[in-house]
Protein backbone atom coordinates (compact mmCIF):
# COMPACT_ATOMS: atom_id res chain seq x y z
CA UNK A 1 0.00 0.00 0.00
CA UNK A 2 1.24 3.46 -0.84
CA UNK A 3 0.63 6.62 1.00
CA UNK A 4 -1.48 9.36 -0.61
CA UNK A 5 1.55 11.70 -0.69
CA UNK A 6 3.49 9.26 -2.92
CA UNK A 7 0.65 9.16 -5.43
CA UNK A 8 0.62 12.97 -5.59
CA UNK A 9 4.36 13.12 -6.25
CA UNK A 10 4.13 10.47 -8.95
CA UNK A 11 1.34 12.38 -10.66
CA UNK A 12 3.35 15.61 -10.52
CA UNK A 13 6.41 13.86 -12.01
CA UNK A 14 4.29 12.40 -14.80
CA UNK A 15 2.74 15.77 -15.56
CA UNK A 16 6.17 17.42 -15.61
CA UNK A 17 7.51 14.76 -17.98
CA UNK A 18 4.53 15.12 -20.33
CA UNK A 19 4.87 18.91 -20.40
CA UNK A 20 8.62 18.70 -21.06
CA UNK A 21 8.08 16.20 -23.90
CA UNK A 22 5.33 18.36 -25.40
CA UNK A 23 7.53 21.46 -25.27
CA UNK A 24 10.40 19.57 -26.91
CA UNK A 25 8.17 18.35 -29.73
CA UNK A 26 6.83 21.84 -30.39
CA UNK A 27 10.36 23.27 -30.50
CA UNK A 28 11.51 20.52 -32.86
CA UNK A 29 8.63 21.26 -35.21
CA UNK A 30 9.29 25.01 -35.24
CA UNK A 31 13.08 24.94 -35.56
CA UNK A 32 13.46 23.88 -39.23
CA UNK A 33 11.01 26.53 -40.48
CA UNK A 34 12.72 29.26 -38.45
CA UNK A 35 16.19 28.21 -39.57
CA UNK A 36 15.15 28.12 -43.24
CA UNK A 37 13.54 31.53 -43.07
CA UNK A 38 16.51 33.04 -41.27
CA UNK A 39 19.04 32.00 -43.91
CA UNK A 40 17.44 34.07 -46.68
CA UNK A 41 18.70 31.97 -49.56
CA UNK A 42 16.95 30.87 -52.72
CA UNK A 43 15.66 27.30 -52.82
CA UNK A 44 15.97 24.93 -55.74
CA UNK A 45 18.74 24.05 -58.13
CA UNK A 46 21.23 26.59 -59.44
CA UNK A 47 20.37 27.62 -63.01
CA UNK A 48 22.81 30.42 -63.71
CA UNK A 49 25.57 32.44 -62.03
CA UNK A 50 26.54 35.88 -63.33
CA UNK A 51 29.76 37.28 -61.91
CA UNK A 52 30.69 40.94 -62.08
CA UNK A 53 33.36 43.20 -60.58
CA UNK A 54 31.64 43.85 -57.25
CA UNK A 55 29.55 40.72 -56.69
CA UNK A 56 27.61 37.73 -57.96
CA UNK A 57 24.05 37.23 -59.17
CA UNK A 58 22.63 33.72 -58.76
CA UNK A 59 19.45 32.29 -60.28
CA UNK A 60 17.71 29.23 -58.84
CA UNK A 61 14.69 27.27 -60.04
CA UNK A 62 12.27 25.28 -57.92
CA UNK A 63 9.37 23.87 -59.94
CA UNK A 64 7.60 26.73 -61.74
CA UNK A 65 9.29 29.38 -59.56
CA UNK A 66 12.52 31.26 -60.30
CA UNK A 67 14.48 33.01 -57.56
CA UNK A 68 17.37 35.47 -57.91
CA UNK A 69 19.71 36.98 -55.35
CA UNK A 70 22.70 39.32 -55.50
CA UNK A 71 25.67 38.83 -53.19
CA UNK A 72 28.44 41.38 -52.60
CA UNK A 73 32.08 40.41 -53.01
CA UNK A 74 33.08 42.54 -50.00
CA UNK A 75 30.77 42.61 -46.97
CA UNK A 76 32.46 45.31 -44.90
CA UNK A 77 30.03 48.21 -45.31
CA UNK A 78 26.46 48.82 -46.41
CA UNK A 79 26.23 49.52 -50.11
CA UNK A 80 23.44 49.85 -52.63
CA UNK A 81 22.43 46.47 -54.04
CA UNK A 82 19.69 45.52 -56.44
CA UNK A 83 18.16 42.42 -57.97
CA UNK A 84 15.35 42.10 -60.54
CA UNK A 85 13.63 39.14 -62.17
CA UNK A 86 11.19 39.20 -65.07
CA UNK A 87 9.28 36.34 -66.65
CA UNK A 88 8.40 36.91 -70.31
CA UNK A 89 4.99 38.56 -70.52
CA UNK A 90 5.04 39.73 -66.88
CA UNK A 91 6.23 42.81 -65.07
CA UNK A 92 9.70 43.12 -63.64
CA UNK A 93 9.95 42.39 -59.90
CA UNK A 94 12.90 43.61 -57.87
CA UNK A 95 14.45 45.14 -54.79
CA UNK A 96 16.94 47.93 -54.39
CA UNK A 97 18.28 49.17 -51.07
CA UNK A 98 21.44 49.36 -48.98
CA UNK A 99 22.52 45.94 -47.73
CA UNK A 100 25.68 44.55 -46.15
CA UNK A 101 26.15 41.08 -47.66
CA UNK A 102 23.27 40.12 -49.96
CA UNK A 103 19.84 41.16 -51.15
CA UNK A 104 16.76 39.30 -49.99
CA UNK A 105 15.67 36.69 -52.54
CA UNK A 106 13.22 37.76 -55.25
CA UNK A 107 10.92 34.96 -56.46
CA UNK A 108 8.53 34.96 -59.43
CA UNK A 109 6.26 32.37 -60.99
CA UNK A 110 7.77 31.72 -64.41
CA UNK A 111 6.07 28.48 -65.41
CA UNK A 112 7.74 27.41 -68.65
CA UNK A 113 8.44 30.96 -69.81
CA UNK A 114 11.79 32.59 -70.49
CA UNK A 115 13.22 34.86 -67.83
CA UNK A 116 15.77 37.63 -67.54
CA UNK A 117 17.57 38.85 -64.45
CA UNK A 118 19.75 41.76 -63.44
CA UNK A 119 21.61 42.67 -60.31
CA UNK A 120 24.12 45.14 -59.03
CA UNK A 121 26.35 45.99 -56.12
CA UNK A 122 27.60 49.58 -55.97
CA UNK A 123 28.85 50.55 -59.44
CA UNK A 124 29.13 47.00 -60.76
CA UNK A 125 26.19 45.18 -62.34
CA UNK A 126 25.22 42.19 -64.47
CA UNK A 127 22.33 41.72 -66.87
CA UNK A 128 21.25 38.56 -68.62
CA UNK A 129 19.32 38.33 -71.82
CA UNK A 130 16.25 36.14 -72.10
CA UNK A 131 16.98 32.54 -71.25
CA UNK A 132 15.06 29.38 -70.37
CA UNK A 133 15.25 29.03 -66.60
Image (cartoon, rainbow, N blue to C red):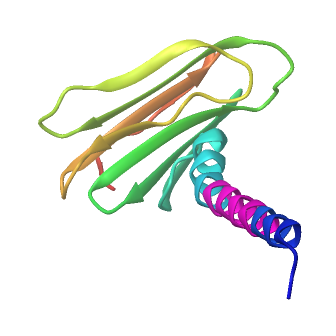
Query: In percent of the image, x 27 and y 26: which residue is there?
Result: 92
Q: Is residue 15 magenta?
A: yes
Q: Main secondary structure of the magenta part?
A: helix
Using the image as rendered, state which of residue 56 and residue 6 is in the foreground: 6
User: Does 105 sit above or below residue 9?
Assistant: above
For the N terminus, the quadrant is: bottom right
Query: In percent of the image, x 18 and y 52: which residue is there?
Result: 113
Q: Is residue 65 left or right of residue 58?
A: left
Q: Image quadrant of residue 32?
A: bottom right
Q: Is residue 119 magenta?
A: no
The x, y position of residue 120, in whole percent, is 56, 23
The magenta segment: 13-27
State the count of labels: 0
Q: Is residue 96 visible?
A: yes
User: Does 57 sit above or below residue 13?
Assistant: above
The x, y position of residue 95, in whole percent, is 45, 20
Query: In percent of the image, x 75 and y 12: which residue is there?
Result: 78
Q: Is residue 98 left or right of residue 47?
A: right
Q: Image quadrant of residue 133?
A: bottom left
Query: In percent of the image, x 65 and y 61: which residue is there?
Result: 22
User: Does 48 sit above or below residue 40?
Assistant: below
Amino acid sequence: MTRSGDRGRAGARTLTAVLALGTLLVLMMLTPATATAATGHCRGHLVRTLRFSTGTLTVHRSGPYVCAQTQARSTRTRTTMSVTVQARGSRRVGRKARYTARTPPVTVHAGGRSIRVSGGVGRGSAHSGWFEG
